[in-house]
Image: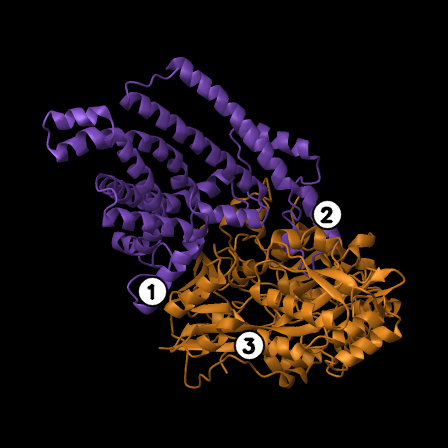
Chain colours: A orange, B purple
Amino acid sequence: MTKNSTTSSFTRRDALRLMGLGGVASLVAPNLLLAPAFGQTPPATPTGRVVVGLSQEPTVFNPLMPHIEVDDGVNFSVFDALFRIDPQGVIVPNLAVEVPSQDNGGISADGLQWSVKLRDGVAWHDGTPFTAEDVKFTLELIVNPNFRAWRTTGHSLVRDITVVSPTEITWRMEEAFAPYLTFLTETFIVPKHILEAATDLNENPFNQAPIGTGAFKWGQRVAGDRLELVANPNYFGDGPHIEQLIFKYIPDYTVLYTQFRSGDIDLVGIISPDNYAEASALPDRVVALVPRSSMESFYLNVERPQFKEVAVREALYAAIDRQSIIEKLYYGVPVPTETFMPQQSFFYNPGLPPQEFNYDRAKQLLDEAGWVTGGDGIRAKDGVRLSFANSTTSGNHLREQVQQFLQQTFAEIGVEMTISNLPAAVMWGEFWQQSQFDSVIVGSAYLIGADPDVTNRLHSGSIVAKGGRGSNNAQYSNPEVDALLEEGARTFDSEARRRIYFKVQELVRADLPFLPLYADTSVLGHKEGLEGFVANANTRTESWNAAAWYWQA
Amino acid sequence: MRSFLINRLFQSIVLLVMVSIIGFVILNLIPGGPLAQYGLDPGMTQDDMARITEQLGLNRPLWVQYFDWAWRLLQGDWGTSFRDGAPVLSVIGRHVFATLLLMGTSTAIAMTVGIWIGIRGATRRYSVFDYAATVGAMVALSIPTFWFGLVGIYVFSLQLGWLPAGNMYKIGDGSFLNYLHHLILPSAVLALVHIAIWSRYMRSATLDAISQDYVKTARAKGLSERRVILKHVVGNALLPMITLAGIQLPSILTGALVTETVFTWPGMGRLFLDSLGYSDYPVVMGLLIFSAIIVILGNLIADIVVAIVDPRIRLA
């Protein structure tokens, strides 16, 4: 195996033992994409260029400001966080020298006192030494009301940040919050010496040409076209082994694939499943299936009178021919799942009852629940017709096929589904956030980083339409799940958390606020000869470890 | 002339104000908004959304937002892009060159070829050439450009391998020849449609001129047919083309939405689509005002040029 993280003197084994997750690594195929590269070594000095094709344009380069997935790809290369999360879901040190835990004393037994030891000898791209002051500045900036920060969950609990020494920082948490460790893997540290002088934090030259500690330095940006990063020869970790890292923006999937085919781009994270077979046959290209953290589901607004009863949701689920959807419409690319939890996660519950496609059972469930077929062929109960709209992002032709397929499917059991799609910019606004839909087809991640805490998505206090604060757009509410989620967020022990989230998955599987269609899988491709690439579903980007990439000599 | 200009200036201001109000209202009426892009982010809470909305000033009444924006614009501040935090004018400036290069080239091709086809078609009316040009123009106008673009890429890039499959240049090669190589396919695809437009206009203008009395007179004087056509017919037929050029001019700067997407051309058209997709209000409004100004200028220039060239027209 080539190196797949920028870790310290800490070995992976240490990290695994530390996290008490020793068994996890073997659960997951070490990595699905790595061509065996025995005998291969990276070049002595950074050589060559890698062009990564993206379907969206990275535009936000201050990693603490609101941004989307593609911006993360850049952040991971320009900046470092205290920790990183590896493909197995293990948190490993990055700017820190060890991952704090209750076992090593970095986190107090009550989960409130945190202490992090930092690496010595790390320098910003401009040569200034990195110290604990930068970490303090970063954590304070996120909750500065004048700063347009990205997510503040967890950070808003941090109090009394103290710089003990240039290499040690401590703080107190307002309440115990275990997911914060994972959140810190997505919290990139920014330079105090540059930003503290800023008059306007939201409109600052830094945001257009950032300075980090990462393996790559800012090169130049050609707006609307690409972003160029160059190797940081003084990087404290392993690598970089390539001289130039380029993110090329290609807005159309067909064109993106075409340019992968023609050789204009070296690596692409998303190839449409329709092109999978053709792409696999391309000469000099490595094409593989990579699991992602998101799940595609038929997502219900359970407050709608049609969906209030579990029996209806079960019946709809039983009527879905998932195998045909996966095999015929998605060319066998994704895999079936019963839960929101990614299958590569330590917290994935493999023991959930599998869905069975069975029209008779679906009809029987509806009959038993008292939904009677009316003169128009549609079932109804107490004046409520079993009819609803389904929406998704318009222009996604594979999803549109799934919709048509399900429309016919549901008609078989006396359920009427109409299709009403919206452009992405409309779909995911208040229509989604305020639960104004009947049902949607959506592919979305439930975890933040790889932490199993899904309070935001499944706790009844997260229903925005009811004054809540999260993104429980299905308006799902189960007191037992609420209690478990609250317990899970306070619990630091991995085994204990595992039991909690197993139970959560069981309950959600039984309640079916959404009908899982499949676990997302990407078709990823890169040129042959590009070594060191490792997919990591625990991050939102394929270029999380660009420091380890190199071209075969 | 002076009163004409003052009049025009006044009209233009009224027009710009109307365009900006209508644009602003419609833009804000579209549901979704700039925060829709974070709707699927599992870690984004409603508190964060509300905070960001307030920080961007989007929770203020619409008219307050409009006057704030308009007042800043009058002071020369076009606002700041939500999406990349850069000033709107600099965002536009970064995309203008690409569009100018593509649209300038294709318009030059379209004008030259279109006018030539139009003249030839009119002087040999009902010939095989004329029919072919007419049918060709209909086909070019009815088939969407993205289809031509994709077919072009398939044939010339993927099958034959002669031309690049998009992009403005190869990364790491900024030579003139490299630009030219990348320019061929998209400008040809764009020109195809414009040739059709230009040739149709030119054909009918030429036919119009041919039937005029002064052409009969010129022929009666015994001028050679070539001289008659070039001096008397074409000279006059080109007059309406100036107006057409005035109408087409804005597109040279505002870009081609579809073609720029198909050929990954980082120009204004794609900037507009992207900004709309992310509800980047300041940039969309900036582009709207920018385009409106160019349209007004294009028409103004065309009117003035026509008045200078055609002594029968007086501006008042």
* Residue contact between numbered discs 2 and 3, judged by CB atoms under 8 Å: no
Amino acid type of the residue tagged 1 in the rendering: Val
Q: Secondary structure at mark 1?
A: helix
Q: CA distance from mark 3 to mark 1?
A: 27 Å
- Quarter holding residue A461: bottom right
Q: Which residue is mark 1?
A: B155
Name the chain under label 2: B
Amino acid type of the residue tagged 3 in the rendering: Tyr
In the foreground, A148 or B46: B46
Residue A448 position in % (x across, y down): 68, 65
B131 sits left or right of A512 in the view: left
Residue B201 position in % (x across, y down): 33, 38
Q: CA distance from mark 2 to mark 3?
A: 41 Å
Q: Is residue B245 above or below residue A370?
A: above
Residue B98 position in % (x across, y down): 38, 47
Q: Which residue is mark 3?
A: A331
Badges 2 and 3, same chain: no
Q: Which residue is mark 2?
A: B50
Residue B305 position in % (x across, y down): 32, 25
In the foreground, B100 or A219: B100
Name the chain under label 3: A
Q: Secondary structure at mark 2?
A: helix
Residue A492 makes an appearance in the image: no
Amino acid type of the residue tagged 2 in the rendering: Ala
| Tag of residue A346 | none
Q: Judge depth for marks 2 and 3 and give the one in front.
A: 3
A48 sits left or right of B288 in the view: left
